[in-house]
Image (cartoon, rainbow, N blue to C red):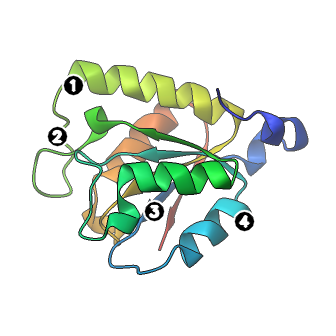
Amino acid sequence: MVNTEYSNKHDDSDKFILTFGYGNRNTYDEFFAYLKDFHVICVVDVRLNPRAWSRKWYGEIIETVCCKQNINYISKVSLGNTSGNNNWAPPDYQEAAIALQEISEIAQVGTILLLCAEKNSCRCHRVDIAQQLQKLVDRKIKHLE
């Protein structure tokens, strides 16, 4: 269930589709700051495999961290990238379309953050995902560094 507290306090101009790549970050400091500053209601993990060189960024760890902040976490491996570069090629286009629709419904409620490994948004498929979501829900996109 998505926390709807945010939507009751803010109008649509305050809601975003954010993207964030954890890169080689050793702490959650910037991640937490963004979650708080933008009133994120849901972190959407768009990695094909929600694992990392550091267990700190494993999906189940991020889910626990988000839960402690009263923020929802969902992993959508169907939005992962099989192309090996920033050109998004989901594992199954039909499943990806379903996932995009589900996420767009959450984005109607409040700000979401798309999480991936690549720190530089220009080199990450999450930019394409954000653009696809923007077609479904009229939200500004902001790529966080």
Q: Is residue 101 above or below residue 79?
A: above
Q: What is the secondary structure assignment of the residue under circle 3?
A: strand
Q: Residue 37: which disc?
A: 4
Q: What is the secondary structure assignment of the residue under circle 1?
A: helix
Which residue occupies 62% across, 48% down? 67
Q: Is residue 14 above or below residue 118?
A: above
Residue 12 position, x and y percent, is 76, 40
**Residue at which label 3 appears:** 20
How far is the residue under mark 1 from the one under mark 2?
8 Å
Give the residue type that dot 3 points to. Phe
**Residue at which label 1 appears:** 93
Tell me which corner region of the image, top left, top right, bottom left or bottom right, holds residue 38. Answer: bottom right
Q: Residue 11: which disc?
A: none
- Which of the marked residues, 3 or 2, is nearer the chain's N terminus? 3
Q: Are marks 3 and 4 in contact (CB under 8 Å)?
A: no
Residue 49 position, x and y percent, is 23, 47
How far is the residue under mark 3 from the one under mark 2?
19 Å
Give the residue type that dot 2 points to. Ala
